[in-house]
Image (cartoon, grey):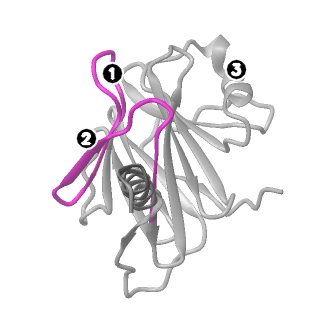
Amino acid sequence: MGKAAMAALVWWAGMAAQAAPLRLPAGKEPVAQGGSVTAAARGALIRYRGWLLALDGAVPEERPDLLLASADAREAPQLRIGATQRGLPLWSASELVKGSTHLRITALPGPDEIPALLLDFGDGDYRIVIPAAPIERQAYPILARRFPGADLALLLQDGRRVMLPLGSGRAQVFGAEQAVPYRFAKVRKR
């Protein structure tokens, strides 16, 4: 085999390894349908079909499946699973599988050009966008156009995370006054 063919084979194997989703062990308890988001200061706890994600320093009572840190002006978003930590540069994605539920996390340009995170649960089930920086209220409608198909935005407002359902035509924000979870059901996209 020639050097060029060997280099191509090594490159292909590296790309295939990157494309393979990371598999997490499934829990033993029954998987609840739907999910919830609970604001916790600048972070949030996201639960969906057996997944538990802790965003920006939110601390759950049980061990989360993964920790997410949104971007800032100097650093890309970070994804941490156990001892493994990786950055998500702009336009990159990580695919994870737990049980039968897939999760794709993508870093996309946010309205402020700092990477925003887009969480895709399942096969088009539910999409959550997480801008890294605060957005003015009058710019909320831009989110639905900039992130088509997103169901919920986790926004920074007055130093804490709030939930904004997208696509409903109303800009009602949840989480600003109370710390109760925002509950959502599986939404099948076509």
Is residue 92 located in the magenta-colored stretch of the structure? Answer: yes
Residue 69 inside the magenta-drawn segment: no
Seen at 46% across and 26% down, the residue is 115
Q: Which image quadrant for residue 147?
A: top right
**Horizontal arrangement in the rendering, residue 180 relative to residue 140 (left or right):** left
Q: Residue at x 66, y 62 (%)?
A: 185
Label 1 residue SS: loop
- Residue 142, numbered label: 3
The magenta segment is 70-96
When the figure is inspected, residue 134 is found, relative to residue 6, above or below; the finding is above
- Disc number for residue 57: 2
**Mark 1 surroundings within 10 Å by alpha-carbon count, few (fewer than 14), some (14 through 19), many (20 or more):** few
Picture coordinates of residue 59, whole percent (x, y)? 24, 50
The answer to which of marks 1 and 2 sits earlier in the sequence is 2
Three-letter code, disc 1? Asp
Residue at image point 57% right, 17% down: 111
